[in-house]
Image (spheres, helix red, strand yellow):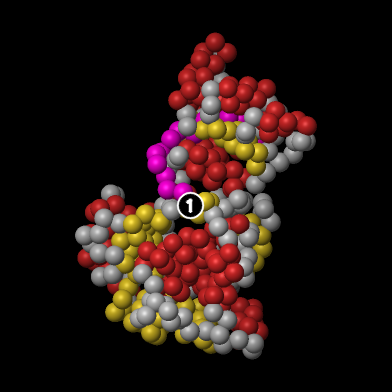
Amino acid sequence: MSGEDICSEVSIVGGTYQETCYWPVWDELYGSGWRSVRVFRALNPEATITFHTAGTDQVERILKIFAGSEKLLNQLTKISSTISFYYNHPLACPKVYGCDGKKVFLKTCGRFVIGFGMLEANAQIEGDWVVYDPQSPSHPQSFREQGGKAEHLALVLNESEARMLSRETELPQIKKALFEHEKCECLIVKCGAKGAVVFTSRDDEGTIIPIHKSSHVFPIGSGDVFTTVFSFFWFSGYKPTVAAMNASKAAAVYCEEKGQVDEIPSQLKEKEFEKFVPGKNGLVYLAGPFFTLNAKLFVSECRNIFQAMGVPVFSPYHDVGEGKAEDVAPKDIEKLRDCSCVFAIVDGLDSGTLFEIGYAVAIGKKVVAYVENETEGSLKMLAGTGCDIEKDFTTAIYKTCWYAAK
């Protein structure tokens, strides 16, 4: 493969699901497989794409519409109901409906194949060049154990999937186990807000792929974009590290464009993002009111998200509690001095939270202020002292993770 030939024919196997997010509002038919088709189509409008998926009559009608105007060959296996994912916000664990636990069987053959794990189907994939993404942090399925065959196999996994599939906990052992058991020639482990690592052999120390820092973060489907763009460049002859760098940038474009895929090809060429490689795992101080049930639930949600992302977090509510002022204040001040940055919930202008912000700014700590409802005048001192004021919840969380890792 030359590195200059554009992949013009590909088979894609994956789910077609309804995705609904309550805040920010998002209600689209995508899923890993169909999103991958749309991304690959954007990258090469003339490509012939064979799409293997499972779906209802409604899904079939939609696929036929696209097949009528482009080179799309649909291999649809009928199921009784469309699977739907419902998110309270993009970082929430979704509720899944329409999945009865029964699985159909799909078989995919082709020279170039992109395969995604599915809730409603088991897929046996055979190809010369295959990229496999199991798409299941809790129950990822092995490519080889499903009967998969590939001359050249690349695995794209997140950290949880890598641990589950390898039955190891540390990256060096994870790498060796997966190269041995899956017989892959390339392994990519995605680390969320910390970037990714590419391995090209069991003895490879790995190449870190930096985060491309977007000004807005909409992560629903960003992993599908990463896998598809990596596949496109790898299939076209580029080295895995180059393909992964393009995939990281494409994911940033997707996040910044709030889930739109059509801008990916042009923005890959034109857009410049700050590249970021984490240097540490610093402590986040979680500042916010906790005097009502709603406030306590939201503080707990923020804390759970940081912990799930592997970021150390100190929450006065959880780690100190609602004691007397002379007991609480010194402990909170100590952690403000120890932390790398502050995530502050500002709506409501709670006096304690504003004090914590002021103290943090005074001792040189970076503050990300998440606020949706306050006036510009109320935020003047925060804006004038270098606080990042962010109205989007997910973006605020990611910015905080990046500051904590500097």
Q: Residue furthest top?
A: 326
291 drawn magenta: yes
Where residue 207 appears, x then y in whole percent? 33, 57
Q: Quadrant of residue 61?
A: bottom right
262 drawn magenta: no
In what element is the residue under mark 1?
strand
Residue bearing the label numbered 1: 275
Where residue 388 appears, x then y in whole percent? 62, 38
The answer to whether residue 167 is visible is no
The answer to whether residue 389 is visible is yes
- For the point 39% across and 77% down, the residue is 3
The quadrant of the image that shows the C terminus is: top left
Label 1 crowd (10 A; few <14 / some 14-19 / many >=20): some
- For the point 62% across and 70% down, the residue is 262
* Residue range highlighted in magenta: 275-295
Where residue 79 appears, x then y in whole percent? 54, 77
Q: Quadrant of residue 260?
A: bottom right
Compared to 241, does 75 lie above or below? Answer: below
Q: For the residue marked with disc 1, what is the amino acid?
A: Lys
Compared to 306, does 241 lie above or below? Answer: below
The quadrant of the image that shows the N terminus is: bottom left
Where residue 201 appears, x then y in whole percent? 25, 64
Q: Quadrant of residue 241?
A: bottom left
